[in-house]
Structure formats: structure tokens, C-alpha cells
Amino acid sequence: MMTRNGVFADRALNFAFWSSLVLSGIAVGAAIAWCPPLVPLALVGSLAVFVTAFMLPEALIILLLAPTPFYILWQAGGLSPVEAAYVVTFGITLFAWMLQRFLRGYRGDRVQSVNSPVRSPILALLLLAFLGATHAELRGKPFQWWASDLNIILGYAIYFVVAGVYTTPKKFQRLLNWMYIISALSLARALYTRLNDGGIFYSEFGSVVPHLSQGSSYTLITFAITVTILFKITHKHKEYSKYLILAGAFGAQQILAGNRSRWMACIGMLGLLFLVVPAYRKYRFVKLGSIIAFSFGLWYLIGITIPVENGFLQAPVVLTDRFASVFEGTQQPTVKTRLSEWDAVLELANRHPVIGNGLGNQFMYLGYDSLRPNWRKTRFVHNSFYWYYLTLGALGIAVLLWLCVAGFVFGISLSKRFEDPYWRGVALGLTMAFVAIVGDSFLGSALSEPGRTIWVGTILGLLAALNQMQHRINGHAEESA
């Protein structure tokens, strides 16, 4: 057993490590955000953020999870002043939590453990990110590029705050509810855009994409959580109706979003869920699936038989054609474009296959999904694993795969340790959400896009928090029984 001095030394070492990490993040943001005229305002704002993070960290965690800032950051195309302020907020939140944790440990108070099988791969990924930033700076890459990429990977660090703050079932459930609210707001924004523009679909690079694709990455996570809980609890559960409505709304958006990478992620996640649920639950799974398939099929038949130019009636026809394009191979323009992009990424990545090219890379590829082929210059990759290979090399891919396997195994084993069906469903739902995000990353950028890594870190942090609360939850379940 570790002595009190050993525990104190371990905590002091952790505090020193994370303090240096966070201060580096703050310096990155301050270099852009704190121009001379705004220094007093920035100092006051930073102090306010620090006090909030110290006294009410949940408020800032919810702010960091909110979808609107991520949309702004992504549209900025680099490390903008908005993103810099966002990085500072994130860094101060992490620093304040570490300081509070250190002080509690110094006083001898019980400190919530953040240990779990995913902690080490997250730490390794953060270390590689700073090595990648150093590599980029030594090669003279634009600061805005590599700093923005650094911000993406630093998002995983929210794991430590979530695992340490949400120490009770009540707090835990409150964050879950906020995740549902944020996802519902992103769905509402997508509906508003659709109604405001007067059409379900719009054209983007020659592809017909539904407006409901906006915000679907958030509802992919909450759909996985809610649908899993739904299959774990009975219809007599007091919150069954709530999860039925949420799963229906978020699931409908996933279908109507028209995003092929998320379709594949949903199919994979639901297939895995079908395998892990008990046999007596599989009947409900098949029944609901049959109802959804029948409803969509009827909708499709109406769309092709009634000669009416109506976006709602034609939606299943367009979506079916879009899904069929997945199987058209290289003849499909968007597939040719995606392959062209990946070829360009691999050509650049293979120059430094072990340690990568560092953060902040830009490359050119030939796009075929427009009226005529054209060369495009971008830093965006439609495959997170290729992105990590490009930036951090084989080492980055190895650590990322370590994180994926550790997160899945940890979540599955944790879900089996709960006696209450609801909490078993929550643990399994978080695991299925992680599986969906990883699946989405093979054809999309869920693990390498601003904001998405914050959600991934939150999912893993909630699993770690559940791991610490399992004895308390199971004990309460025994008392209730």
C-alpha cells in the first residue's frame, strides 16, 4: 500500500505535469487572443473563468460541450480569436480542477480517482500531440495551423475533469441530461435551417445533402446512448417514454441526415448492440427494426408512385439513391474524390511514416464531385486514422488503436458489473456511443475535428466516473430491492 508521503508525491507529480500542459495551452491561446488593447479585458475574463471553473466546473463543461462554438471554430479554418478564447477557457477549466484536486489531497480529503484503462493511452496521445507541435514549429509551419490541430487533440484531456467532477449518480445524470439537451438543440437548429431555406436538401460540391446533416454528429452519440438504454430497461421504467422519444428523434435524424459515414457507424453500432443484448431483448430489437423498415418502405413506395414534386415525399428516394452510391465503387464521383484525397494524404504521410509530419499539414488532391475535376488544397481528411498517421505517424496510429480497444473492452466489462438495468444500459450506451464515433471516423473525421474530441473525452470520462461509483450504485440497488 502506498504511504501518505508516496500519495502526496504522486499527486504533486501529476499536478506539475498537468499544470505545465495547461499553461502551454493557455500560452497558445493568449498569443493570439491577448492583443495589447484587450489585455485588461482578457485578464478580467480569465479571472472570471477561473473562479467559475473552481466553484462551478459543471457550467464550463456544459459550455465546452455546446455545439455552436465548434461550428464557429470549424468555419474559421484556423486558430481564430474565437478558438483561442475557447482554448483558454478549456485550459483554465483543466488547471482549476487540478488545483482543486491537489488542495483536497493536501488536506487529506478523499479524491475521486480518474484511473481507468483509457487514462494511459490518452496521456500518450497528449504527449505525442506536443511532440507533433514541436515538430511542426521546427519545420516552420504556420502557427495557426498546428495550434488548431493541437487544440483538437487536447480535447481528450476533458476526460480527467469529467472523471473527477461527476462523482455522484445525481451529478452524472445531470450531465447526461445536458448532453441530450445540447443534441436536441443541434437538431432544432437543423430543422430551423431546413424550414428557413424552404427545402429539405441542398447541394454541396455536387452532392445532394439534407439540411438535417447539420449537428448529426452530436445526435449520433446521444442516439447510441438512448437506444441502448431503451433496450436495457422495461416499458414499466419511469423514464421509458423519455428514452423512447429521444431515441426516435435522434434516430430519425441519423436516417434523414444522409451522411454515409454515420449511416455505416449506426449500422455497425446497432449490429454490435444486437449481439451483446440478452436473447429475450433481441425480440424487441427485431420488432422495432421491422416497424422502422416497414414505415420507411411505405414512405419510399409513396414517393415513387405519386408524381408530386414534394421534398418530404421524395426524401426516401433521394436517401436510398445516396445509400446505394456506397456500393457503386470508384465510378461514383464522391468515392473517386475521397480516394484521391486519401492517396494524397498517404503520399505525404509516407515521407515520415514513424513519427509523422507533425501538426498543421496542408495537401492538394483532385476533386471529381463537381462539374469538372479541379485541384483542391485542404487540411481536412475524411478519415481520422489517416489524419493521425499523417500528423503523428505509426506511433500515433498505435496509440489511437490502443485507446479504441481499451475504451471498448473497458466499457463492455464495466456494463456487466452493474445490477440495475438502467445503469447497465448507461454504461453499455456510452460504450456504443464510443463505438459509433470510432466507426464514423473510418469515412469521416469524428476523432480529428474541432469539438468532437471533447465529446469523446467526455464519454470516456463518464465511463471512468461510473467505474468509481459502481459499488455505491449497486449498494443502493440492493437496498431498494
Image (cartoon, rainbow, N blue to C red):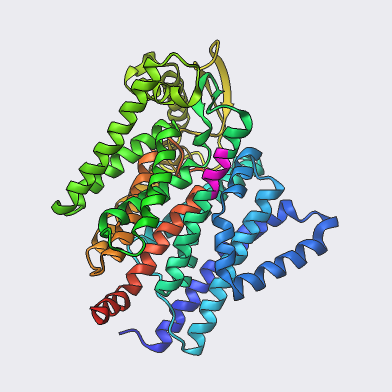
Q: State the residue in front, 407 or 19.
A: 407
**In the depicted structure, whether residue 42 falls above or below residue 14:** above
Q: State the residue in front, 239 or 175.
A: 239
Q: Residue at x 50, y 49 (%)?
A: 184
Q: Residue at x 60, y 62 (%)?
A: 91
Residue 291 spot, x, y in % from top left: 27, 38
Q: Is residue 397 magenta?
A: no
Name the quarter where the C terminus is drawn: bottom left
Name the quarter where the N terminus is drawn: bottom left
Q: Does residue 131 show up?
A: no
Q: Does residue 251 show up?
A: yes
Q: Which residues are magenta?
A: 185-191
- Assign the magenta stretch its main secondary structure: helix
Q: State the residue in front, 237 or 73.
A: 237
Q: Is residue 188 magenta?
A: yes
Q: Residue furthest left?
A: 279
**In the depicted structure, whether residue 87 falls above or below residue 324:** below
Residue 376 spot, x, y in % from top left: 57, 22
**In the depicted structure, whether residue 239 falls above or below residue 141:** below
Residue 322 spot, x, y in % from top left: 40, 23
Residue 217 spot, x, y in % from top left: 46, 43
Quarter location, residue 465? bottom left
Quarter location, residue 43? bottom right
Q: Going by the image, does 33 lie left or right of 344? A: right
